[in-house]
């Protein structure tokens, strides 16, 4: 049997996937988030969504493990579990709303809001008053609902941390830990629901080798960057991802 048949991808497509994962892992190593957003945008040109999701979930879990040495001492576990509690409650709400709301319109609205708040933050906007248990819990609910509705659940959490002026190292570590826990949960559900198959496993194995290299490079950039530089990179990343989402939505109309 031809070796490429295990992947059900052409050689060019395999090189393309490796490149996307490499860039995404560098971003993840620097930001602490953004891996899924980049991979979803990149993979969508060659794979259907139902094949993309299990690959990304598995890689998110693995890349979080590779990030542990860089972030462990910077994780705010209280923040993570408070957000996680909100996500657990918000996720079913998002899945329920999925039946009644147009995901495309919701996705478009979220992207526009993220661009708006990112520009505000770039101009120096901050709000320490929402940095309390209620604010974290409410952010978790919004994140869970958006994750069930549009898969953009990570962005509200990133915005919350930026608005409350949390240190970049804490932002990066807490986001990485949060996504690790949530992705394990969703990956297990995907496995038992039959979404993960042998082809998924074959596609994941060679990509795992790329992850620690990208994370290492991303961490090097993070260590050398100043706090102001980190925040600007995150702002621009959020804006670019949002604009990409808007363009994809508009192309479907």
Image (cartoon, rainbow, N blue to C red):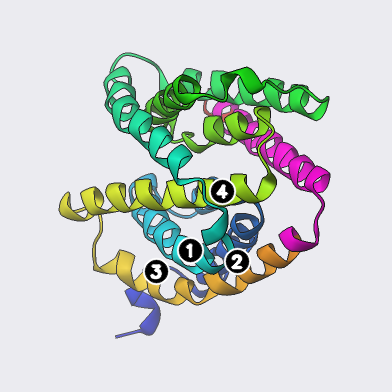
In three-dimensional space, the C-alpha distance between marks 4 and 3, rounded to whole angstroms, equals 19 Å
Foreground label between 3 and 2: 2
| Helix, strand or loop for disc 1 | helix
Q: Which residue is drawn at 81% across and 25% down?
A: 124
Tell me where residue 129 appears, x and y as whole percent: 61, 18
Tell me where residue 3 appears, x and y as whole percent: 37, 83
CB atoms of marks 3 and 2 within 8 Å: no
- Residue 49 quadrant: top left
Foreground label between 4 and 3: 4
Tell me where residue 114 appears, x and y as whole percent: 63, 26
| Helix, strand or loop for disc 3 | helix
Q: In this view, does 136 lie to the left or right of 122?
A: left
Number of labels in the image equals 4
- Residue 236 quadrant: top right
CB atoms of marks 2 and 1 within 8 Å: yes
Q: Which residue is drawn at 50% across and 38% down?
A: 154
Q: Is the magenta stretch mostly helix, strand or loop?
A: helix
Number of other residues with Cα within 10 Å of mark 4, as a class: few under 14, some 14 to 19, many 20 or more: many
In three-dimensional space, the C-alpha distance between marks 1 and 4, rounded to whole angstroms, equals 11 Å
| Helix, strand or loop for disc 2 | helix
Q: Which residue is drawn at 53% across and 64% down?
A: 67
């Amino acid at each position: 049997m031809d070796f490429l048949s295990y992947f059900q991808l052409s050689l060019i497509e395999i090189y393309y996937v490796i490149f996307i994962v490499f860039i995404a892992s560098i971003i993840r190593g620097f930001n602490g988030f953004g891996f899924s957003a980049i991979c979803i945008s990149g993979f969508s040109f060659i794979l259907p969504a139902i094949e993309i999701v299990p690959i990304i979930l598995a890689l998110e879990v693995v890349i979080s493990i590779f990030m542990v040495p860089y972030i462990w001492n910077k994780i705010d576990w209280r923040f993570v579990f408070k957000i996680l509690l909100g996500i657990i409650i918000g996720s079913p709400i998002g899945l329920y709303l999925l039946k009644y709301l147009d995901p495309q319109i919701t996705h478009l609205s979220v992207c526009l809001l993220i661009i708006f708040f990112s520009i505000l933050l770039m101009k120096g906007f901050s709000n320490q008053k929402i940095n309390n248990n209620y604010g974290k819990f409410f952010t978790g609910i919004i994140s869970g609902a958006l994750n069930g509705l549009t898969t953009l659940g990570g962005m509200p959490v990133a915005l919350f941390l930026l608005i409350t002026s949390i240190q970049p190292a804490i932002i990066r570590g807490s986001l990485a830990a949060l996504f690790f826990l949530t992705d394990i949960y969703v990956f297990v559900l995907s496995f038992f629901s039959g979404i993960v198959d042998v082809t998924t496993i074959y596609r994941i194995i060679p990509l795992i080798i790329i992850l620690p290299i990208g994370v290492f490079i991303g961490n090097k950039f993070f260590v050398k960057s100043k706090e102001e530089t980190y925040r600007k990179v995150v702002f621009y990343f959020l804006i670019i991802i949002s604009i990409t989402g808007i363009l994809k939505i508009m192309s479907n109309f």
